[in-house]
Image: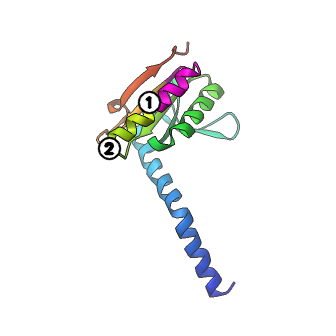
Amino acid sequence: MDISRLLFAIAFTTIFFSPAIAQNVDENAHQARLCADLQTEVAVGGQMRADCISDTHAIEIDFAQKWKEGGGQALAYGVATGLRPGLILICERSEASCLASSLGTQQTLSALGFGFTLWEYLPTDERLGQCHKSEFGLPKN
């Protein structure tokens, strides 16, 4: 491979993959803080990995703007484990943006009849117990 192709490959990778890698690193740092007392990266239902598992919840952590993806993953983890689905929304933008994502999650999953737990994780929260927590639907028995 000549030097110009190598430089192009490096530039392409940096431009197109750095945001995804940076977001992954960010998400991993949040996961370490929020799941400190829980099982992490637990294989569930084939090729899925739940971010956190507690005695009662199978939890996905995702950025608030990705609430649709995170909600679907949380539901899949809940089905695969028999635990209550949980979604932690990382709220790095404005409180209004976080509220819109939270309401979208609540309306969508509640309309589908799923019981789930939703946490809103703000930059000032140090651990999961400090996050705003909401319960929707019936708890799993």
Residue 23 sits above or below residue 14 on the image: above
In the structure shown, which secondary structural element does the residue marked by tag 1 occupy?
helix
Between the residue at mark 2 and the residue at mark 1, the CA separation in whole angstroms equals 19 Å
- Of the 4 image quadrants, the one containing the C terminus is top right
Image point (53%, 57%), residue name: 20
Q: Residues within 10 Å of mark 1 (few under 14, many from 20)?
A: few
* Residue 35 is at least partly visible in this image: no
The percent coordinates of residue 81 (x first, y second) are 62, 26
* Image location of residue 21, percent across then percent down: 52, 58
Residue 124, picture quadrant = top left
| Residue 108 is covered by the magenta coloring | yes
| Magenta stretch: helix, strand or loop mostly | helix
Q: Which residue is mark 2?
A: 123
84 left or right of 64 in image: right
Q: Amino acid at mark 1?
A: Leu
What segment is highlighted magenta in the picture? 104-116
Residue 12 % position (x, y): 58, 71
- The amino acid beneath tag 2 is Pro
Q: Earlier in the sequence, mark 2 or mark 1?
A: 1
- Determine which of the numbered discs, if any, sits on residue 103 in the image: 1
The image quarter in which residue 73 lies: top right
Residue appearing at x 69%, y 84% in the figure: 1
How busy is the neighbourhood of tag 2: few (under 14 within 10 Å), some, or many (20 plus)? few
Q: How many marks?
A: 2
Q: Which residue is drawn at the image coordinates 56% and 65% (left, top)? A: 16
